[in-house]
Image (cartoon, rainbow, N blue to C red):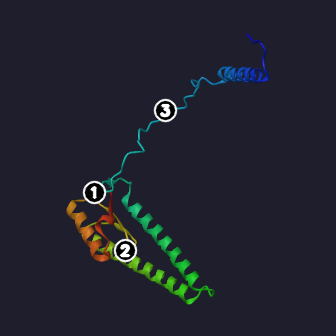
Amino acid sequence: MNMIVGKRQIILMALVLGLGIAVYLNWIYADGGNDFVLTGKMSETKNYGDAQYVESPLDIGDGEAYFAEAKITRTKSRDEAVETLKTMLSDSTLDADQKAELALQAAELAKSIETEGKIENLVKSKGFSECMVYYDTERVDVIVKTNGLLSNEAAQIKDIIVRETGVDDKNISIVEIN
């Protein structure tokens, strides 16, 4: 039996010994994980992963306040968009093609605003007290104040939207607010 210990075997023994010491120290100084401090109990049992259907009514609280705030927000964002377009149109470094493109965007914005207002008025004429419409060329979102939307009322709203915009009915979303 050859009892000569080579350099490789000494290095291997040192590494195994170092690894053993590291595991031992980790085991000694590691937290057991059972020392959590209980600060209070959660009172809500809300599951944030639950689906929320668009067709079901939302309880926002005061529906009137929601519609007032939504209209103010929409007006502010439109005013900012119009101001940006005006600023860009008044820029003297733009060529004729760029100005024509900006004028086209301004015309589309004006048409969108007019269409939203027209749809809102037509929906209100069907007996809804409040209505908000968000329209772009591909999608229409309608928010109505109702205590329960009947299928014939939803059909009337979709008919108005399709007639006024030409948007496919699969791109129409109707949300109820109590």
Which amino acid type is shown beneath numbered disc 1?
A: Asn
In percent of the image, x 30 and y 66: which residue is there? 129
Say above or below: 176 vs 6: below
Which amino acid type is shown beneath numbered disc 3?
A: Lys
Say above or below: 35 vs 140: above
Nearer the observer: mark 2 or 1; the answer is 2
Kindly check if marks 2 and 1 are in contact, taking CB atoms under 8 A apart as contact. no
Say above or below: 2 vs 92: above
Q: Where is residue 148 in the image (x, y as percent from the top left)?
A: 26, 57
* Quadrant in the rendering for residue 146: bottom left
Looking at the image, can residue 178 be seen? no
Mark 2 lies on residue: 116
- CA separation in Å, label 3 and label 2: 47 Å
Local SS, label 2: helix
Mark 1 lies on residue: 147
Q: Position of residue 112 (x, y in %)?
A: 40, 77
Residues 65 and 31: in front is 31
* Left or right of 109 in this view: 174: left
Of the numbered discs 2 and 1, the one sitting upstream in the chain is: 2
In percent of the image, x 55 and y 82: which residue is there? 86
* Left or right of 44 in this view: 159: left
Which amino acid type is shown beneath numbered disc 2?
A: Glu
Looking at the image, can residue 111 be seen? yes
In percent of the image, x 52 and y 32: which residue is there? 40
Quarter of the C terminus within the rendering:
bottom left
- CA separation in Å, label 2 and label 1: 23 Å
Local SS, label 1: loop
Mark 3 lies on residue: 41
Q: Where is residue 90 in the image (x, y as percent from the top left)?
A: 59, 86
Kindly check if marks 3 and 1 are in contact, taking CB atoms under 8 A apart as contact. no
